[in-house]
């Protein structure tokens, strides 16, 4: 900065110190109240723009240090050299004799704050802030997912341990029963043999007693004959004893066990319960860049030519609802529908079966997925937009807006909705601030979608589809009642092709990104009967179309 903005430059030149109250960029000096008054009426400076010192101090330090007078010659900059990209005073021209691109600096700076260059800078800064926010949000989501995954793994480890314990307990019970049965079987065999041996032992003892009595009291003849008889009995007993010893009846019976090798691996080989691994997969984080995005749109158009689109029916869904005003796709292939008259929201699984319903909802016009398991639901008949948690099936938040609201689309932390007489409105989900996008009055049944830097909305009353930018400037309008009457739901694919429902033409048409061409994709022959809404899922290239009553269809788009 060439001058001290805290002191009045004029007074300082006169050796008087007075605080400045305004700053003149043309004079490159601060002015006190008295000098400011003279400055505003002087012929040489009456057209100079001044700013209060309080406001001027808000400028960044780098801006405050920029001087509007040449530091070498102490003269005001009057020219700009495009070759060297620098401002010049009249004396500087001598060093730029060979430069052909010297331009009056006033011509360059004229309306610079409203120029496209300044607008681009503004947008680039917004874009950078949005990209940082998107990366931060992505990393915060990753942090949360790590904690969730850790809890899931903990639960799985405990569950695995429980399964192992249960299985081992069962195996233990089974082997114990088997051990008891084996022991009982062998014990019965031994007990039976012991009983037989005890009987034989009694018989042999009786022989011993008889022999002793014979020896003492029997005659010689009696003794001789008795010996013959006893010999025969003893042979029988010896034969019995021999049969026992020759058989396996006297084998030593033992019980042993061999641990299953799989169990041995658990107790011996397995050193760890599991392996914890960390993987890093490149995240498909879409960073927005204005020029690149425009180039991508241009490149993508030929590959998604409307003449090459092929729709294949994947499934038919019975929504069980009447007056369906909104439909969308949720992560995992789930589908969601809103019924305006029944005041309910129905969620279906990817296979077409019903997941759950939310009844007695306050206003259920259109709906859109906004991330974090949440959807935004417009009311249609009130000045409220509800944020609903689809994971816990409960109302999360209510946004108060300044108009009735119909069709809605989500983009970069904002909801863009059809505000009837107020046109297209945009509300921030972070601070709930509302921005007016267009002033064009919309029908009560208008729907909106977005692609890149463009917005597309339908007008039920005049059978039109309009494309505009975020400043409300209309780029093109499509209107052809021979193919499209009373358009409602609208959506866009990855190539910028616009899909629109025709309520009274019972069809779905696709319009080229430039609005010049169209093609009918679906008709009543495909099951459409007063279709109301549709949604193109860019992640799966599927098109969900819902009739006003009950039937909905999911198509694959190739």
Image: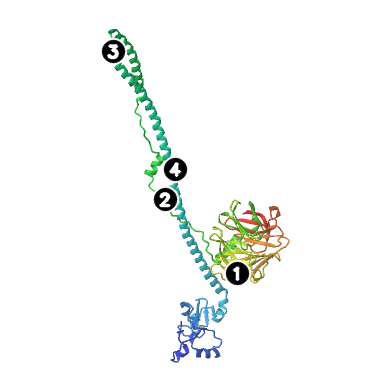
Q: Which residue is mark 4?
A: 167
Front-lying residue, 269 or 161:
161
Residue at the image point whose x is 38% and y is 36% from the top: 258
Task: Out of 104 and 458, give the one closest to the viewer.
Answer: 458
At 32% from the left and 10% from the top, the residue drawn is 228
Left or right, 536 with reference to 94: right
Q: Reading the chain from its start, which is encountered first: label 2 or label 4?
A: 4
Instruction: For marks 2 and 4, give the one nearer the viewer.
Output: 4
Asked whether residue 132 appears in the rendered view, the answer is yes
The numbered mark, 1 or 4, whose residue comes first in the sequence reads 4
Q: In which quarter of the view is residue 476 placed?
A: bottom right
Is tag 3's residue or tag 2's residue first in the polypeptide sequence?
A: 3
Q: Which residue is mark 1?
A: 401
Q: Estimate the x, y position of residue 320 in percent, counting from the top left.
A: 65, 54
Q: Find disc 2 in the rendering and name its residue.
A: 275
State the CA–CA distance, disc 3 to disc 2. 88 Å
Which of the numbered marks, if any, corresponds to residue 214? 3
* Residue 532 x, y percent position in the rendering: 67, 59
Kindly identify which numbered label has been placed on residue 494.
none
Q: Residue at x 57, y 73 (%)?
A: 116
Check contact, mark 4 vs mark 3: CB within 8 A.
Answer: no
Q: Judge whether residue 303 can be spotted in this image.
A: no
């Amino acid at each position: 900065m060439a001058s001290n903005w805290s002191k009045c430059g004029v007074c300082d030149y006169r050796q008087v110190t007075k605080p400045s109250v305004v700053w003149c960029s043309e004079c490159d000096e601060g002015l006190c109240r008295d000098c400011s008054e003279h400055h505003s009426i002087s012929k040489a400076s009456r057209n100079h723009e001044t700013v209060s010192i309080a406001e001027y101090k808000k400028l960044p330090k780098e801006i405050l240090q920029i001087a509007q007078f040449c530091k070498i010659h102490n003269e005001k900059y009057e020219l700009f050299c495009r070759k060297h990209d620098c401002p010049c005073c009249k004396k500087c021209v001598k060093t730029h004799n060979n430069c052909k691109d010297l331009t009056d600096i006033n011509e360059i700076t004229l309306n610079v704050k409203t120029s496209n260059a300044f607008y681009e800078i503004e947008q680039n800064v917004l874009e950078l802030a949005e990209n940082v926010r998107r990366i931060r949000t992505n990393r915060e989501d990753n942090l949360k997912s790590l904690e969730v995954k850790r809890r899931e793994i903990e639960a799985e480890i405990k569950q695995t341990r429980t399964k192992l314990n249960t299985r081992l307990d069962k195996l233990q019970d089974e082997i114990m029963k088997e051990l008891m049965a084996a022991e009982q079987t062998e014990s019965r065999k031994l007990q039976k043999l012991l009983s037989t041996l005890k009987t034989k032992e009694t018989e042999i003892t009786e022989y011993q007693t008889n022999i002793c009595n014979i020896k003492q009291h029997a005659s010689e003849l009696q003794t001789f004959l008795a010996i013959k008889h006893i010999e025969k009995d003893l042979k029988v007993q010896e034969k019995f004893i021999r049969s026992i010893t020759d058989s396996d009846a006297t084998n030593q019976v033992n019980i042993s066990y061999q641990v299953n090798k799989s169990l041995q691996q658990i107790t011996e080989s397995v050193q760890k319960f599991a392996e914890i691994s960390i993987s890093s997969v490149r995240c498909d984080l879409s960073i927005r860049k204005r020029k690149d995005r425009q180039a991508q749109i241009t490149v993508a158009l030929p590959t998604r030519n409307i003449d090459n689109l092929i729709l294949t029916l994947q499934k038919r869904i019975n929504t069980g609802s009447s007056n369906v005003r909104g439909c969308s796709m949720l992560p995992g292939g789930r589908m969601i529908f809103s019924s305006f008259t029944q005041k309910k929201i129905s969620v279906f699984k990817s296979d077409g079966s019903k997941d759950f319903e939310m009844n007695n909802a306050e206003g259920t016009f259109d709906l859109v997925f906004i991330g974090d398991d949440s959807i935004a639901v417009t009311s249609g008949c009130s000045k409220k937009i509800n944020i609903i948690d689809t994971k816990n099936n409960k109302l999360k938040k209510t946004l108060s807006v300044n108009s009735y609201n119909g069709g809605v689309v989500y983009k970069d932390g904002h909801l863009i909705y059809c505000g009837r007489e107020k046109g297209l409105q945009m509300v921030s989900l972070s601070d709930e601030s509302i921005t007016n996008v267009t002033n064009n009055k919309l029908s009560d049944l208008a729907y909106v979608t977005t692609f890149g830097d463009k917005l597309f909305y339908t007008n039920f009353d005049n059978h039109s589809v309009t494309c505009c930018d975020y400043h409300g400037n209309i780029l093109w309008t499509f209107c052809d009642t021979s193919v499209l009457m009373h358009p409602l739901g609208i959506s866009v694919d990855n190539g910028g092709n616009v899909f629109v429902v025709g309520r009274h033409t019972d069809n779905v048409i696709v319009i080229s990104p430039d609005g010049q061409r169209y093609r009918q994709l679906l008709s009543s022959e495909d099951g459409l009967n007063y279709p109301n809404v549709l949604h193109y899922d860019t992640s799966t290239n599927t098109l969900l179309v819902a009739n006003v009553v009950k039937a909905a269809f999911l198509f694959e788009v190739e």
